Amino acid sequence: MAGMSVSLTALEGLPLVKAGDDLGAMLAEALRRAQIVPADHDILVVAQKLVSKSEGRLVNLADVTPSARACEIASEVRKDPRLVELILGESTEVVRQKPDVLIVAHRLGFVMANAGVDQSNIGRDGAECALLLPRDADASAARLKEHLDREFAVDVAVVINDSFGRPWRKGVVGVALGAAGLPALIDLTGTADLFGRALRVTEVAIADELAAAASLVMGQANEGRPAVHIRGISLHAAPSPAASLVRPKEMDLFR
């Protein structure tokens, strides 16, 4: 899947993204500014916030009227009822709730805190706002890939990443919300190990590994490096979307 070395380069100097901005063009310009000439099999990992902002997913909380259910849950989890209303609107199921914690099943299948509704690093212009996840992150990744492929006459891959907490470990890690142009999940079942024993259940979450690696370069606070170029990985399996990483509920032993 990879050579002996992989390079990750943050694209600096990206301007703040607004609704309606041509994110593909902005990323292409950032690559040129970094003097990177994209090649086949290169991968661009893009922070979810860039995509959501460009797609107009910023919501002014002043425009949100919380429902009775949102108010009831908000009183238990100690969150703004308007935020809870947005979270419920993005979710299909409340999985767990307790003071300061609201875990839901997002409509795209992710089991996550707050349905990804976030107020950090979004810019407010004096208003109290929240940012929602893209409506379809795989489709968003596909559009960015199409733009970059056309712009540079190459075949690149795009991963849209976000920071997730994990139920049995502390801390957040980067995971893939969307992917295009690469196999998000590779099934190694039947492949021999070092001693010739066939692997029985091994699957590799390639898109998540790329998302986590890029997060190391992006940072999690005020670094301002929301896109990372990756080179040195060649994946030969058929492309699959990030949706293939979502474990179906009927296979989830903990719900």
Image: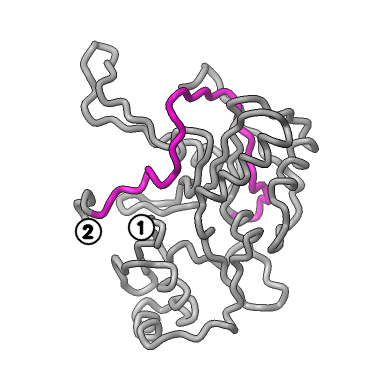
Residue plotted at (21% across, 53% down): 250
x, y percentage for residue 23? 69, 51
Q: Is residue 91 left or right of residue 42?
A: left
Residue plotted at (23% across, 11% down): 196
Q: Which contiguous range is marked in magenta?
A: 221-249
x, y percentage for residue 111? 35, 57
Q: Quadrant of residue 155?
A: top right
Give how far apart the Cα atoms at labels 2 and 1 are: 10 Å
Amino acid under disc 2: Arg
Reply yes or no: does residue 203 show up in magenta: no
Q: Which residue is mark 1?
A: 111
x, y percentage for residue 24? 69, 46
Reply yes or no: does residue 224 show up in magenta: yes
Residue plotted at (38% across, 55% down): 110
Q: Which residue is mark 2?
A: 255
Front-most of residues 170 and 226: 226
Q: Pointer 2 and pointer 1: residues touching (CB < 8 Å)?
A: yes
Indicate which disc residue 193 carries.
none
Q: Residue furthest bottom?
A: 68
**Which part of the image, by quadrant, shows the C terminus?**
bottom left
Give above or below for 95 relative to 30. Answer: below
Q: Secondary structure at mark 1?
A: strand
Q: Residue furthest top?
A: 195
